[in-house]
Image (cartoon, grey):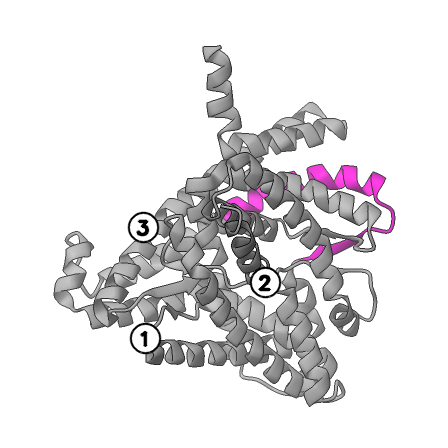
């Protein structure tokens, strides 16, 4: 009995090993060779462990920033970054999150097989983020771990098929076909951008007829973009807090050097997190796809947002700049109102704003790209502020989810479940 309990606690209760076992089963079912099974399983587990290493460094850097920002401005400063919040959530709800992700993918396959929503969501890291959100929301609502897994898996699986279906018209305008879907949980924002574009401009006035300076391409590199953003906001927080406050958390590091080290540490942590996520998802997703391709006819892959970038590269930059301007404006409004301040971090604003720009451009040219991305930029500032109190209930502070689809699902789910407490 003691051995059985140890196996349940230390094997099935360990998120990394649990996901590794799922990859193992999928590879065995596909009759892969011993070498492929062993390599795939080990890389899945190691990828998860790398993820945890990055999580620890990122949480530490975020906590220091939160301390300085609060001291300097007497306000809460929140950075909307799904990777950071998911990493924090995994330290508290790792097993629940992992199970929601795994069984949610199974439900997605069922939905694709038996409903009109024929999309299989292949952006694994976004399913992980969604699973983390659902684990946090159900936990904050008082559900047991088992109930959280059941409810979370069904919701994730359904929306993994529904959201790409919701964005199908915008994708058709971009690609000219229905061969791929958008697998990025800002679909409400992208669909809205596409609609706005059709109202403010014409697709003939494409952004691709414009010329932009080459230096803006620096923001396409997520390490560079997040480093620039974090350095700026860390120094703003440090200078506002003052030398004495910085020295209290700097541990002997000179107070003007400390913000630089912390900003780059956070950037490095995000890189480690993304590396770990890519490693384990690179193994576990193929383990499922080999099975799904045999049982789901007419399935449509839903791919990550960079899949649309080649269709309108100039709209990518215009969308980012427009969305980021909206984020800065929203931050100023939050400061004026004295409420929780959402700080526009470059990495989500680049990918989300860029994609919104491509959607808006496809239906409304450069006017659609500017207007659509600007509105989405406001949504990904307001959404994190609305859902942030739920994050705090389970001890997650300093960051939130910027994805519009998460807010649209998470808030109603929390209030509905709270009625039954």
Point 64% across, 63% down: residue: 305
Circle nearer the viewer, 2 or 3: 2
Q: Nearer the viewer, residue 379 or 322?
A: 379
Residue 60, numbered circle: 3
SS class of the residue under badge 3? helix
Q: Earlier in the sequence, mark 2 or mark 3?
A: 3
Residue at position x 65%, y 28% from top? 24
Residue 268 in view in this figure? no
Quarter residue 376 falls in: bottom right
Residue where numbered disc 1 is placed: 338
Prevalent SS, magenta region: helix
Q: Secondary structure at mark 1?
A: loop
Image location of residue 312, percent across then percent down: 68, 75
Magenta span of residues: 275-303
Q: Which mark is residue 408?
A: 2
Q: CA distance from mark 2 to mark 3?
A: 30 Å
């Amino acid at each position: 009995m003691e051995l059985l309990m140890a196996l349940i606690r230390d094997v099935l209760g360990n998120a990394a090993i649990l996901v590794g076992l799922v990859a193992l089963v999928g590879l065995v079912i596909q009759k892969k060779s011993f070498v492929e099974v062993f390599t795939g399983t080990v890389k899945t587990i190691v990828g998860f462990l790398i993820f945890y290493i990055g999580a620890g460094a990122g949480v530490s850097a975020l906590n220091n920033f939160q301390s300085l920002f609060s001291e300097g401005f007497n306000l809460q400063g929140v950075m909307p970054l799904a990777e950071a919040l998911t990493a924090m959530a995994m330290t508290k709800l790792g097993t629940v999150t992992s199970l929601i992700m795994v069984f949610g993918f199974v439900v997605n396959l069922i939905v694709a097989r038996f409903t009109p929503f024929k999309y299989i969501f292949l952006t694994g890291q976004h399913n992980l983020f969604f699973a983390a959100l659902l684990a946090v929301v159900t936990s904050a609502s008082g559900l047991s771990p088992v109930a959280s897994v059941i409810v979370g898996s069904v919701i994730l699986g359904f929306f993994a098929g529904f959201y790409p279906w919701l964005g199908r018209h915008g994708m058709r305008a971009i690609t000219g076909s229905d061969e791929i879907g958008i697998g990025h949980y800002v679909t409400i924002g992208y669909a809205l951008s596409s609609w706005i574009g059709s109202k403010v401009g014409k697709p003939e006035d494409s952004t691709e007829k414009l010329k932009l300076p080459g230096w803006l391409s620096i923001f396409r590199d997520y390490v560079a973009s997040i480093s620039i953003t974090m350095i700026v906001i860390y120094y703003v927080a440090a200078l506002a807090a003052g030398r004495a406050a910085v020295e209290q958390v700097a541990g002997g590091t000179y107070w003007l050097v400390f913000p630089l080290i912390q900003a780059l540490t956070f950037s490095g942590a995000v890189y480690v997190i993304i590396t770990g996520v890519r490693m384990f998802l690179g193994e576990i997703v193929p383990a499922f796809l080999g099975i799904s391709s045999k049982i789901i006819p007419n399935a449509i892959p839903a791919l990550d947002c960079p899949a649309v970038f080649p269709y309108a590269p100039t709209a990518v930059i215009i969308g980012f700049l427009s969305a980021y301007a909206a984020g800065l404006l929203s931050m100023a409004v939050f400061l004026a109102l004295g409420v929780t301040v959402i700080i526009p971090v470059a990495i989500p604003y680049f990918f989300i704003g860029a994609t919104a720009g491509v959607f808006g451009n496809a239906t409304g040219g450069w006017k659609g790209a500017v207007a659509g991305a600007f509105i989405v930029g406001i949504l990904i500032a307001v959404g994190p502020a609305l859902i942030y109190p739920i994050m705090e209930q389970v001890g997650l502070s300093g960051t939130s989810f910027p994805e519009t689809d998460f807010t649209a699902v998470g808030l109603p789910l929390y209030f509905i479940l709270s009625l039954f407490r």
